[in-house]
Image (tube, rainbow, N blue to C red):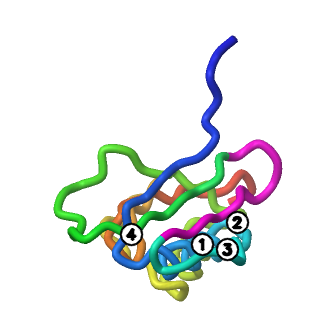
Amino acid sequence: MASVIKSVSFDAHDALALATFWAAVLGSDVDEESTAQKAFVEAAGWGGPNIWFNRVPEPKVAKNRVHFDLRAPGTMDEEVRRLEHLGATVLRRGEAITTMADPEGNEFDVEPGPNA
């Protein structure tokens, strides 16, 4: 039997703030016992991995080696605007992919949705 991805973990300066951002992005909730030291976001919908956020003393200093690829529910531009409103920043815009960063600088990509 093969392994499954149970959770993805992020190092963070403020675990609760970063968890709150990603919960809003993914349409989920932050676990009620979460703190600035450690926070948990349960996967929205069935089958996705949960996300842990752990406070670390050092800042992010290099490009991520792993990142999320998000599929927009509608157009990529609409989703990019929504994510910017939540606190993300655009790093690079392309026709098929927009690369963004979360409030702590972790990169992720946004792709158009199936009906875009």
Crowd class of label 2 (few under 14; some 14 to 19; many from 20; radius 10 Å): some
- Residue 90 inside the magenta-drawn segment: no
Residue 55 is tagged as 4
Quarter of the image for the C terminus: give it: bottom right
| Mark 1: amino acid | Glu
- Residue 39 inside the magenta-drawn segment: yes
Residue 74 is tagged as 2
Crowd class of label 4 (few under 14; some 14 to 19; many from 20; radius 10 Å): some
Per the model, the C-alpha gap separating discs 1 and 2 is 7 Å
Q: Nearer the viewer, residue 39 or 89?
A: 39
Per the model, the C-alpha gap separating discs 3 and 1 is 21 Å
Q: Residue furthest bottom?
A: 85
Per the model, the C-alpha gap separating discs 4 and 3 is 15 Å
Q: Where, by quadrant of the figure, is residue 62 drawn?
A: bottom left
Highlighted range, magenta: 38-48
Q: Where, by quadrant of the figure, is residue 106 drawn?
A: bottom left
Q: Residue furthest right?
A: 46
Per the model, the C-alpha gap separating discs 2 and 4 is 33 Å
Residue underneath mark 1: 79
| Mark 2: amino acid | Gly
Query: Which numbered disc flags the more N-terminal residue, 2 or 4?
Result: 4
Residue 30 is tagged as 3
Q: Position of residue 42 (x, y in %)?
A: 71, 60
Q: Residue at the location (56% across, 69% down)?
A: 39
Is disc 2 placed on a helix, strand or loop? loop
Q: Position of residue 59 (x, y in %)?
A: 22, 70
